[in-house]
Amino acid sequence: MLNPKTPRPSTIPPLISGGIMLSYHCTNACRHCLYRCSPKRPNEWMSLEMAERVFAALAREPALESVHLAGGEATLNSELLLAVVQMAIKHDVRLSYLETNAAWCADLDETLRRLARLKEAGLPGLLVSASMFHLEFVPFAHTRNCVDAACQVFGRHNVLIWLPHMYAALDQMPDHHRTWRLSEFCDHFGLARYDERLPGLYQTIPAGRAPEALRKCYTPYPAERFASERCGHDLCSTTHFHIDLYGNLITGFCAGIASGSIDDLHPEITPDRSPIVHTLCEEGPFGLSELAKHEHGFVRRHEGYVSKCDLCYDVRRQLHTTARFSELRPVDYYECR
Ligand code: SF4
């Protein structure tokens, strides 16, 4: 049964605000990462030719407000990053900021120098990630260097700390020059090791890597609990879209699903053209799991699921192995941990 209140989207609407993912390769494998970025993801980067196509396509979007630059960790490829900033300016696509995990900011002077080059190229601001999940990979001293240098280069109002209360918490850890495991962070603040409040401290969405890496923080439910949930709203949300290095369009927070591509950012959502997206819009992940059960022998996880996106990923991972669904991209999203 379809929920009568759920609108039936027929295409991906105009893009409003989003990010350009230059790679999935990252210094970190953070527990909350929606896109499952990590050092193990291929060291592959958006080509200049693809970047040209991306910005040319974005320049034609009538409702586009701005885009940010992201990875993986985009600063791992400084020259590409500079070229992409210049390309955005050339195409008159408004940049908002570069997102970084600050792993590269061991030295304040070097951080200042690299940020000044990016500002000179046209980058207007920086978003610095700060959380107990990043702290497992990045010492707080690096995060602080990054924020201090960015404030000098871009001005305080053009620097966004995501999130400020987490930055303040990391500052309270006894040693700023080392990384801390999540369990150590919890011990320091008197939290249970898998405290149910942990994901909420960083506004973690229970999708991507989080359902696996933070599973004990959540309550699992049988798949049937999600039977009434549809995903048209999520898959047609273009206020937080991403375009990855391969030219895949990712809408909402639905990593691993190419709802469009740089060749067609607004495809018609029909059962023939977009069977996965169409099914998720019309019947949600539970409906997709029914289809996968009948047609591909999918078996639901006995222990249950912590969210509809947890169920969705389990089904998609099985469907990916059939190599029949071109929407399930990039393929290594389903093969990495
Ligand atoms: S269940 Fe799947 S399609 Fe729906 S919001 Fe989550 S990831 Fe996106």
Image (cartoon, rainbow, N blue to C red):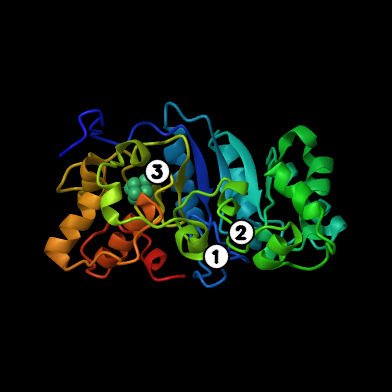
Query: Is disc 3 in contact with disc 1, using a CB cutoff of under 8 Å?
Result: no
Q: Earlier in the sequence, mark 1 or mark 2?
A: 1
The quarter of the rendered structure image containing the N terminus is top left
Disc 1 beta carbon < 8 A from ligand 1? Answer: no
| Mark 3 → mark 1, Cα distance in angstroms | 20 Å
Regarding residue 133, the answer to whether it shows in the image is: yes
| Mark 3 → mark 2, Cα distance in angstroms | 20 Å
| Mark 1 → mark 2, Cα distance in angstroms | 7 Å
The residue nearer to you, when weighing 150 against 261, is 150
Side of 61 relative to 190 (left or right): left
The residue nearer to you, when weighing 194 against 46, is 194
Q: Which residue is mark 1?
A: 25
Residue type of the residue flagged with mark 1: His
Residue 30 image position (x, y, % from top left): 58, 62
Residue 73 circle label: 2
Q: Residue shown at 67%/56% (left/top)?
A: 101
Q: Earlier in the sequence, mark 3 or mark 1?
A: 1
Question: In this rendering, is residue 241 above or below 139?
Answer: above
Question: In this rendering, is residue 119 above or below 207?
Answer: above
Q: Which residue is mark 3?
A: 251
Query: Is disc 1 in contact with disc 2, using a CB cutoff of under 8 Å?
Result: yes
Q: Earlier in the sequence, mark 3 or mark 2?
A: 2
Regarding residue 114, the answer to whether it shows in the image is: no
The residue nearer to you, when weighing 27 against 98, is 27
